[in-house]
Image: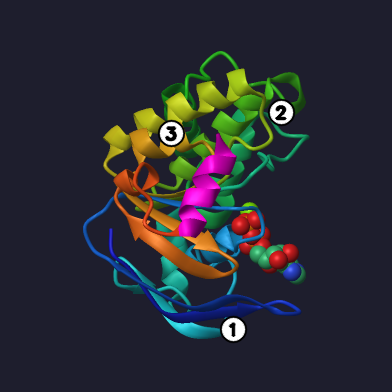
Amino acid sequence: MKIELNKISHTYDVEVLHELELVLTEYNAVALIGMSGSGKSTLIRLMAGLEKPTSGTLKINDWDVTNDAEYKKHIGFVFQSHNLFPHLSLKRNITLVLEKTRNIPLDEAEQIAEANLRLLKLEDQMDKLPKNVSGGQAQRASIARALSVNPDVIFLDEPTSSLDPILTDEVLIAIEELRELGKDFVLVTHVMSFVRKFANYVVFMQEGNIVEQGTPKILDAPKTEQLKDFMSKVH
Ligand code: ADP
Ligand code: MG
C-alpha cells in the first residue's frame, strides 16, 4: 500500500496532530501504536477519509483522500465497538449497506453477506440480532460488513478494545486470516504480540507526533526513550 502524509495537522479545540510526515510504499499491514490520547484514532480517521485534516494533504494508494469522494468506496472501517444496527440481524446489517450504498440487488447482497459471514465463521449466527451473539461474534460481523463492500484497504481502530481476553484472541485470529485476502490493512491496537505477528510496519505516536517507525523489530530494539518507555508499560 502507498501512504503519503504531507504536513498533516489536526485541531479540535487544540491541535492534536502536528505536521505529520509519512511516506510508505511497500507495506500491506501497518500498525499505529502509542499511548491513549496520542492521536492514533484521529490519524486513522483522517486516513480513512472520515474526517478532513485541518491542514496538509494525504494520499492512500494514490487516492487524494481529502478531495476524491470515490475514495470512500474503496475502503472499509472497523470501529472500537461493533456499531451494528441493534434491530437488524447480522446478515441484514450487511445487505442493507450493500443495497443502500452500492445499489446491489437484495438477492446478490445476500450472497455477498453470507459469503463474508462464513469467512468470519458466523454461518450459524447470520439470522441473530447483535444482542443475541457474543461481543466477539458481533465484532466479527462488523468486520464481515467492512469486507462486504470489497474494499482495497481495511482500517481497524482498536477492534478488540471492548472485548475480554478470550474474545480478543478469537477476533485477532480472524483478522490474521484476512491477510490471505491480499488487501491492505491499517490497524490501531495495544496488543503488541499481534503487532509482531501481523504488521510489517509500525508507526509509534506520542502527543500527536510520529516519534519512531520501522518494521516490528523496533518493538524489541527501540531507539527512542519514548518507545522504550511505552514498551515497558504495555506489558
Ligand atoms: P488515541 O486514539 O491515540 O487515544 P485520539 O486521536 O482519540 O487518540 O485523541 C487525540 C487527542 O485528541 C486527545 O487529546 C483527545 O482528547 C482529543 N480528541 C479526540 N477526539 C476529539 C474530539 N472529537 N473533540 C475534541 N478532542 C478530541
Ligand atoms: Mg483511539
Numbered disc 2: secondary structure: helix
Pick the quarter of the image with the C terminus.
Answer: top right
Q: Are marks 2 and 3 in contact (CB under 8 Å)?
A: no
For mark 1, what is the residue?
Answer: 54
- Residues under labels 1 and 3: Cα distance? 32 Å
Res 137 label: none
- Magenta segment's dominant SS is helix
Location of residue 234 in the rendering, given as x and y in whole percent from the top left corner: 57, 39
Which is more foreground, mark 2 or mark 3? 3
Above or below residue 91? Residue 60 is below
Q: Are marks 1 and 3 in contact (CB under 8 Å)?
A: no
Which region shows up in magenta? 225-235
Asked if the stretch drawn in magenta spans residue 232, the answer is yes
For mark 3, what is the residue?
Answer: 194
Q: Nearer the viewer, residue 172 or 127?
A: 172
Numbered disc 1: secondary structure: loop
